[in-house]
Image (cartoon, grey):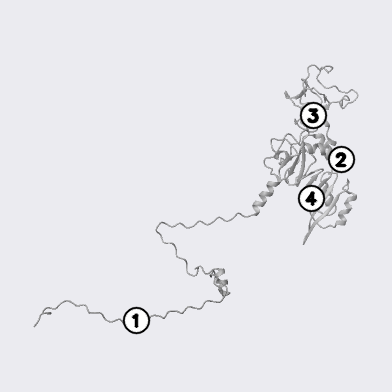
Amino acid sequence: MVHDPQRTGRASSGQARLSEDDPSGEDPTGGERIAKLLARSGVGSRRDVERLIEEGRVAINGQVLTTPAVKVEAGDIITVDGAVVGEPEPVRVFRYHKPVGLVTTHKDPQGRPTVFEALPRELPRLISVGRLDLNSEGLLLLTNDGGLARALELPATGIVRRYRARAHGRITQERLDRLKDGITVEGVRYGSIDARLDKAKDGPQGANLWLTVTLHEGKNREVRRVLEAVGLKVNRLIRLSYGPFALGTLGVGEVEEVGPRVIREQLSDFILPENLPKGDRPQYRSPAAKSRRARQEAAATELVPPPPEPKARKAYKAGWAKPKPKPGHAKGPSKAKLKAKIEGKTLNAPRTPTGPKPAARARPAAPARPGPARPGPRRPGPKRPGQGRRG
């Protein structure tokens, strides 16, 4: 809100003008409820804002409020605990892959972990569009606009929800087709439900089934209660899509913001024109979320084993003899030589010119083998005494 010191015609108390004919405090001249505006600004839920007003912590134009039945007009300055509340953000929507074991609430009396405690701290204050129970998983839409959340989760809106369910029991497709006419379970009437049997595996104690369930109302625990009414016990439930938004390749526990252009194209019927976001790119980008192409490349890399590392050659000291080849491992003739030998050819033999073959040359006569060698002169030995003298 922008402060305008020149504005006139306002009540001196600082409270927005209330209608005397309307005890609820609705102002026919226009404006927005204080609780709704502060909820969109991220102060807290409407119940939290009403509690703050009762404690005297909210003021408009310096005047402390005593009732939540007040409407805010353009130019009013709102403070909570003395701090000025800025203009509310345009509508933002997030896709979140809820894992099993988280409660879809801001505060759990039993102290169980909640969805909003698991969200990144840099996100604004968000509320869920509908709920997923503790043991359910899959797509959960989050938004900062309470009016949009209320419009999307109402059964009268008829937003399509699609689930993937694993159940135990036995059933036929003919019995599931009867759910298209609606069913009443424990006094609660459920509208048309399209259930398709995808896979069935028989066992000694029953059958494990996979079903795709499509509905338009989204009442509390609707899928589980309807399937239990036809004899099936659901042991796993995954929400695949909610209206125009699908779970897709979003990883478990990951959150991704919907682009402003998609919000304008798909949800403009449920949002006031002044609250529609502008631009084309979302403000938040999850650092942990990978693109689809990067995931595919990573998966392909994991499937292909890395090439084996070449073995290092054994190093020898200078002067050492090289190892001798082991017996039986001598390198034999090549395949080409063996093939040529079988075919009677000589490998790499020089080509002879065509025509008559040259006459064979006569081999020279072998030299006569020499006989025994004559004994040579005897080597004289040492002279004896008196030898060599003449008589």
Element on which disc 2 rests? helix
Residue 228: x percent and y percent? Answer: 83, 52
Give the spatial CA distance, label 1 vs label 4.
Answer: 107 Å
Numbered label attached to residue 164:
4
Quadrant of the snapshot with the C terminus: bottom left
Is residue 154 found left or right of 88 in the rendered image?
A: right
Indicate which label's residue lies in the foreground, 1 or 4: 1
Q: Residue furthest left?
A: 391
Q: Which residue is mark 3?
A: 37
Q: Amino acid at mark 3?
A: Leu
Q: Amino acid at mark 2?
A: Thr
Residue 91: x percent and y percent? Answer: 78, 34
The answer to which of marks 1 and 2 sits earlier in the sequence is 2
Residue 143: x percent and y percent? Answer: 77, 37
Q: Which residue is mark 1?
A: 370
Give the spatial CA distance, label 2 vs label 3.
Answer: 23 Å
The answer to which of marks 4 and 2 sits earlier in the sequence is 2
Give the spatial CA distance, label 3 vs label 4.
Answer: 37 Å
Element on which disc 1 rests? loop
Q: Amino acid at mark 4?
A: Arg
Q: Which residue is mark 2?
A: 157
Give the spatial CA distance, label 3 vs label 1.
Answer: 131 Å
The answer to which of marks 1 and 4 sits earlier in the sequence is 4
Q: Which of the 4 image quadrants contains residue 45?
A: top right
The answer to which of marks 3 and 4 sits earlier in the sequence is 3
